[in-house]
Amino acid sequence: MINRRKFINASTLSAAGMLLSAALPEEVRASEKSGLFADKKPAYDPVKEILKYKKIDAHNHVHLFDGGPEGNIEFAEKFGITKMIISRPITSGEGTPKDFRGYNDLVLKVMKQFPDRFTGQLTLNVNYQKESLEEIKRCVGEGMIGLKVYHQVKINDPLFYPIIEKFIDLNMIIHMHAHCQLGFAGYRMKYDTNSKPNTSIPEDFVDIATRYPEAMFQYAHIGGGGDWEYACKSFRNHPNIYVDTSGSNNPENMVDAALEILGEDRLFFGSDNCYYQSVGKILCSGLTETQRKKIFFDNYNNVLKKSGRNF
Ligand SMILES: [Zn+2]
C-alpha cells in the first residue's frame, strides 16, 4: 500500500521552471511579500531549493537532445547538476561497429573537453560480439565508467552474457533503455508508442538480474511514460536492479512510491535531458533531506565507488 502524503503542489515547480530562465524578478518577490500569504511563512524559493543539492545526472545524453555539450552545460548550471553521466546510444539505424565507435568517440571528445562536468558510458551492439568486447576495453581504458545500451537486443539475450560478465569484472553498471506498456490495471496501452520488439521490459531485467546477481543494472527512466509502478514492484526483491527517475512524465507520487517499494538506496536522479520535470519531481516529493541527497548524488556515487571511479 502506497503511503499518500501531503506534497508541495507540482504547479509551484512548473512555475519554478519558468522563473529559472531569468533571475527571480523583484516584482515577484514584492508581490509575494504583500500578497495573501504575506504574514505567513516566507515564500518558497525554488531557485534556492534547486541549488541546495549537488547532483549526479545518472541518465544524460550528448549530441542527441541539447545539441553539443554547451547545451548540456547551460542546463547543468541552471539546475546545479555537478556531474552528468553521458552517452550517445544507437537510437536508430543498423548499429554497426563503425556506428557505435563513432558515437563513443563523440562522448570521449566531450569528456576530454569538459572533464569536470562529464563522465561517459559507452555503447555497443552485441550482434557484433568481438567488436563490442574490444570497444569495452578501448572506452573503459579512456575513462568511461559504464555501459548504455538500447533496443537492438534484449538485456537477457544470451548474446549479452559475455558483455555482462565483463562488466561484473569491472564492477560497473549496465544501463539499459526499457519500457513497460501494461498501463493501469493490466490494460494494454491503446496507442502505438513505436517501441521496438526487442526493447527490454521489466521481466527481462528480473530474468538477467537473477542469472547474474553480482551484476548491476539500471532500468532507464521510470518517468518515461511506461507503467513505472509495475516495474518497481517487479524489482522489489532484486537488489542489483536500480532505477533512474528521469523522463518527461510526472505522475503524482511516483518518486515517493518508488522509494517505498525499492527502498532509498536504489533510486538515481536522472534527467534524460528533461531537466525541469526531473528536478521538479524530486523536490515535489515527500522525501526526507537524507533521502533527497541519496537520490540526487550519493546512490550513484556509491555505485561508482565499487569501481573506484567515484566523485
Ligand atoms: Zn535516454
Image (cartoon, grey):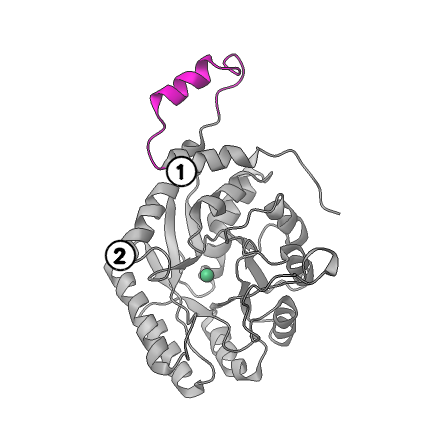
Disc 2, SS: loop
Q: Is residue 78 magenta?
A: no
Which of the marked residues, 1 or 2, is nearer the chain's N terminus?
1
Count of all numbered marks drawn on residues in the image: 2
Question: At which x and y percent is residue 158?
Answer: 57, 84
Question: At which x and y percent is residue 199?
Answer: 56, 71
Q: Which mark is residue 84?
A: none
Specify start and end residues of the magenta stretch as a single range.
21-43
Q: Residue at x 36, y 76 (%)?
A: 100
Q: List the single residue furthest toward the left.
A: 113
In the image shown, does 239 or 77 lie closer to the viewer?
A: 77
Cα–Cα span, label 1 and label 2: 21 Å
Q: Residue at x 67, y 53 (%)?
A: 261
Left or right: where 296 falls relative to 157: left
In the image shown, does 48 or 184 lie closer to the viewer?
A: 184
Disc 1, SS: helix
Question: At which x and y percent is residue 277?
Answer: 48, 45
| Residue at the spot of label 1 | 51
- For the stretch drawn in magenta, what is the main secondary structure? loop
| Residue at the spot of label 2 | 114
Q: Residues within 10 Å of mark 1 (few under 14, many from 20)?
A: some
For badge 2, the amino acid type reads Phe
Cβ of mark 2 under 8 Å from ligand 1: the answer is no
Q: Residues within 10 Å of mark 2 (few under 14, many from 20)?
A: few
Q: Is residue 247 above or below residue 144?
A: above
Q: Is residue 41 magenta?
A: yes
Left or right: where 293 falls relative to 96: right
Q: Residue at x 62, y 43 (%)?
A: 252
Question: At which x and y percent is residue 41?
Answer: 52, 18
In the image shown, does 45 or 24 lie closer to the viewer?
A: 24
